[in-house]
Amino acid sequence: MWLQSLVGISVVFLALIALSFFIYLFGKVMKNGNGSKPLNKKKARGSSVGTPLEGSPAMDESGDELIAVITAAIMAGLAQAGLSPECRIKVRPFNRVSSDAPAWNLAGRNELVSK
Amino acid sequence: MDFVNAIGKLINDSGFMTMTWQQLLMIIISCFLLYLGIVKKYEPLLLIPIAFGMLLTNLPGAQMYHAEFWSDSANPEFKPDYMMILQKGGILDLFYIGIKSGVFPPLIFMGVGAMNDFGPLIANPKTFLLGAAAQLGIFFTFIGAQFLGFTPLESGAIGIIGGADGPTAIFTATKLAPHLLGAIAVAAYSYMALVPFIQPPIMKLLTTKKERQVEMKQLRPVSKKEKIIFPIVVTILVVLLIPASAPLVGMLMLGNLARESGVIDRLSKTIQNELINIVTILLGISVGATATAANFLALETLLIILLGLVAFAVGTAGGVLFGKIMYWTTGGKVNPLIGSAGVSAVPMAARVSQKVGQEANPSNYLLMHAMGPNVAGVIGSAVAAGILISLLG
């Protein structure tokens, strides 16, 4: 009974370790196979959605104006949610979300913002 | 006089007069399971057909399923007479041929393969280990069941509940202990439905808040070529290593290949929709039919349900603890919560990892990371089933 269990769990681990190892190796081979395309990657990054275009409103507005806009948006959101507009909120320095942030983190932020 | 006799005969032949209290209790249990499926939405796709099969088989006089055609407790060497079943069997006997012959569970697996993206597992192959660690519950319960007096064959069939994989549990139970099929299937699907309640306390107990807050690095993109080659390689490697797992692993990977190849969309859509839906109905109703009062109302059913819970809890703990080992060895890059998803139950267990992770850190998205161990768990439980069948069958 003990021996059968030990053999059983060992074989499960061995089988999945073997698969894991093979998939890892295969991934490496595939990566090397695509290694000659770094330029495309750079180019793709350069045109990522998160980067503001030159001359766009985001580039022209000063930090103070953006803070005012963000504060107004928050107050409007609170009022829409039925909360007292008298609550005091002060927006301090803000950071643009990096375009390199993991997609799931961005999705999480978007979900929180949309709540 | 003839009229009175005819009415009297009708009354005497009716189920009301011939029903035993055990059958009445089974009808109440099946109605309760229907309530869980419909109102509480506990795995309704399977629980409702199972519960309805259970209801039909326990209605006296319905004669839709005959337990005596399939097994004889006095004769362990009993073999069903298929010609007699085809001639005299009820409709549920005919459906049950699909389970007894081992056809339905692999077909369900084909659907599971066609519906799941193995990309997260290919992107992070280390998560295969979490899928293996979560199978600890199977072997732990295999030992525990023998201590409680079950035979090795029965213990193997009960232990597989810990894999949290319904088709695998049914497949293994059919091969090792067909007389326990009803109880094992009900326990397996009930616990799969209860994943969101069973797993979180264990996950929280075994991890610190700091560990639960870990944000994992985004997974690398996986190429189409890798996704196509993966099911072929897994089939070759696993079936060569454990031939008994071929029906489950082979069909799982065929379904996945149909999805990823991109050239048989019509077949892929059929596997993902019509085929799996039809098989789910037939499998569910015939599994439920095996839960006759004589089979189900026994102390061993209660023990099976208890052992199933133990198997599930130990499997979850095994995955989380191995996740902790990965957390330490990678310097905190792996969130141990994804380990609990190693107990198959796709994609519910991965969603639980995501939910518990987000409770600790609202900006944490573990879902795709947890899908790796989740699909590894499906492969792992099929491998474990193959091993048990090879060792015991």
Image (tube, rainbow, N blue to C red):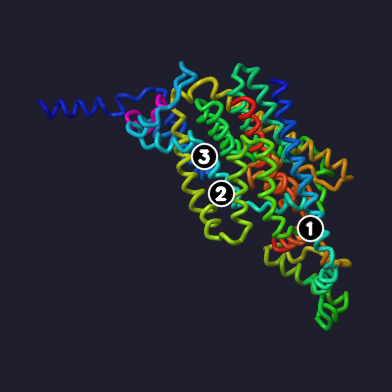
Residue in the image at 61% along x and 32% along y: B161
Q: Main secondary structure of the magenta part?
A: loop
Q: Quadrant of the C terminus of chain B?
A: top right
Disc 3 marks which amino acid? Leu
- Dot 1 falls on which chain? A
Q: Residue at x 19, y 26 (%)?
A: B8
- How far apart marks 1 and 2 lie (CA) works out to 28 Å
Whether residue B66 appears in magenta in the rendering, the answer is yes
Q: Secondary structure at mark 2?
A: helix
Q: CA distance from mark 1 to mark 3?
A: 48 Å
Q: Which residue is mark 2?
A: B111
Q: Are marks 1 and 3 in contact (CB under 8 Å)?
A: no
Q: Residues within 10 Å of mark 1 (few under 14, many from 20)?
A: some
* Residue A66: image location, x then y, percent: 83, 74
Q: Nearer the viewer, mark 1 or mark 2?
A: 1
Q: Residue at x 42, y 23 (%)?
A: B22
What stretch of residues is rendered in magenta? B60-70
Upstream in sequence: badge 3 or badge 2: 3
Kindly indicate the quadrant of the structure image that contains residue B356.
top right
Disc 3 residue crowd, few under 14, some 14–19, many 20+, Cα 10 Å: some
Q: CA distance from mark 3 to mark 2?
A: 25 Å
For this rendering, which residue is in front, B362 or B78?
A: B78
Q: Residue furthest left?
A: B1
Mark 2 chain: B
Q: Amino acid at mark 1?
A: Met
Q: Which residue is mark 1?
A: A30
On residue B101, which mark appears? none
Residue receiving disc 3: B36
Left or right: B212 in relation to B246: right
For numbered disc 1, what is the local secondary structure? helix
